[in-house]
Each structure stands twice: as structure tokens, then as C-alpha cells.
Amino acid sequence: MRTNPLRRISSLIGLLITALASPVIHADGLNDLQQALKNFKQTSPFCAQVNASLQSSNGEENKDRQESNKEGHTQFTLEQNQSGLQISYPSELLSIIDKETQLKKQNPQSPTPTTNAMNRFKYAEFSTLFNPVRDIEDDLHKATLVKEEALTFQGQPARLLHLQIPLEKLSEDERKNLKKYHTDVKIWINEQGIPLASRSTGKGSGRFALVIGFDFHFDVEKSYITKGDRLLVSKLTSTSNSNGAGMHENETINANLKLIN
């Protein structure tokens, strides 16, 4: 069985993605950020509602044929405590999925928007909402600080860190098949070094099996909140597109996390 090149490109993007005017002058915002991240032990219990939406399309390059489009919305509740992580889906959502499944059996062309969103927004995706410390530290391990700016964020003194991740800083698995790669990372932090928001934009290109060329681009924005000793992502917007083997694929994911109580 031949592997779909676009699936491999999407998996590669996921790895790269699986997956900032203050009156006070700070000498080292990067160090402040690293120290602040160490204080987030990620142990405080929390309960939150998550709403997520998906839009994606794929098709042949330079063709007038109709593209394959998918979209959908899902919502669920995340609750983490000493017993572990619990994920609860509302009964209405489960009923919609059951109905979509039955209609799909009767008509293979029947749309399944809610099922599409559920299948796409799995643990690997929503874990970035409740454990962003891991992702930020991973980026910092690979990145080089370019400059630091003093500014305001939502009316409060803040700092913006500009970082870059070049090809040679990626892991061997992430570098595989890549010829070119570059990511710009921006992290907004407050005076204590706590992350407020971030944005990562990257692009790359390469070849599979020396003959199948591909290129991709991604843009990921996050806003952060805190709960006890836990850092959480309150808003996530991720867009990506890729081209290869005569095909192209585009995807947009939006997710919002709202604390309950």
C-alpha cells in the first residue's frame, strides 16, 4: 500500500508544530521566562469547557476539480485532579455523532462535520491546551533569542521575545526529509516572565524518497491564563498548508478553553 504523501507532510507539520512599553528595563527576559516556567508544576486541579472547530480542504494542484472539504465543531469538558484526566462529551453531541454515522452508512457522501472535528481534535491536540509549558520549553531548547522589546500588552507592561528556530536545531526525526526550514517565534511575557501570548510562524520544504518534493507553512497563535500552579492555553488558532505529489492541503483549527468555577 502506498502512503499518502500529504498525510506524511501533515504528520511532519504536526511534529514541528506538536506544538510576546514597559517603564522597567529587564536585562534578561528569556531567563525570566525560563524561571517562570519552572514554577508551573502543572499539578493544580482544574475544570474547563473546550470549544473547537475545524476547517480543512485538499485536492489536486492546478486543477479545476472540486476540492474535498471538511468542517465541523466539537465541545467537551476537561477535568484534571488527583485521579487523573476526565473528558466528558455532552449527550447532545454524542447523539449528533450517532446520527451522522447512520446517515453515512446510508449515503457515503453524507457530511459528518461533528465526527470530523472529534476525530481531528484528539489527545495530542487538546493536551497542548492544558500543558503548554512542555511545548514552550521545547521551543526554547531549539531557539535562539534575536531581540527583546519592552512594550504593553492589553494595557499592562510587558516584554516581547523574538526567537528563531533554524533547521539544524530540529531533532533528527523532525529534520528527516527536510532541505529548508525556518520558524520565527514570538512570546509575550509580563514583568515576572509569565507567558501572556505566543505566535509561531514557520515554513519549510524537502523531498520524500528523493523524488517527491513538498513544501509547507504554518502559523500558530496562543493566549495563556493561569490556574494555581498551572499554565493553560485559553485560545488557540492554528493554520497550515502543504503541497506535494501534485496535491495540496489546507487546515484551520480554532479552540477556546474556559475555566469552570
Image (cartoon, helix red, strand yellow):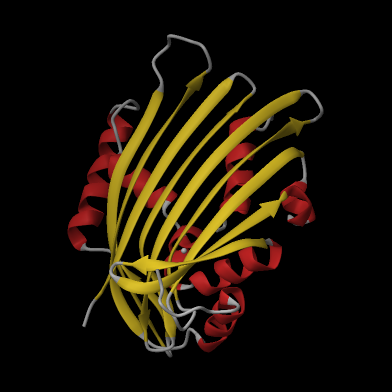
Task: Determine if residue 176 is in view.
Answer: yes
Q: What's the residue at 56%, 75% (across, down)?
A: 29
Residue 24, quarter of picture:
bottom left
Q: What's the residue at 67%, 61% (across, down)?
A: 143
Residue 84, percent across and down? Answer: 44, 83
With 100 as the anchor, is 81 left or right in this view?
Answer: right
173 or 181: nearer the viewer: 181
* In the depicted structure, whether residue 247 falls above or below residue 63: below
With 61 as the anchor, is 101 left or right in this view?
Answer: left
Which quadrant is home to the C terminus? bottom left
Residue 240, percent across and down? Answer: 49, 40
Q: What's the residue at 70%, 62% (across, down)?
A: 142
76 or 183: nearer the viewer: 183
With 150 as the anchor, is 148 left or right in this view?
Answer: right
Q: What's the residue at 38%, 89% (across, down)?
A: 228
Q: Residue furthest top?
A: 64
Q: Residue furthest left?
A: 92
With 88 as the anchor, is 90 left or right in this view?
Answer: left
Which quadrant is home to the N terminus? top right
100 or 259: nearer the viewer: 259
Residue 129, percent across and down? Answer: 42, 66
Residue 205, percent across and down? Answer: 68, 34
* In the depicted structure, whether residue 142 falls above or below residue 83: above
* In the depicted structure, whether residue 34 falls above or below residue 151: below
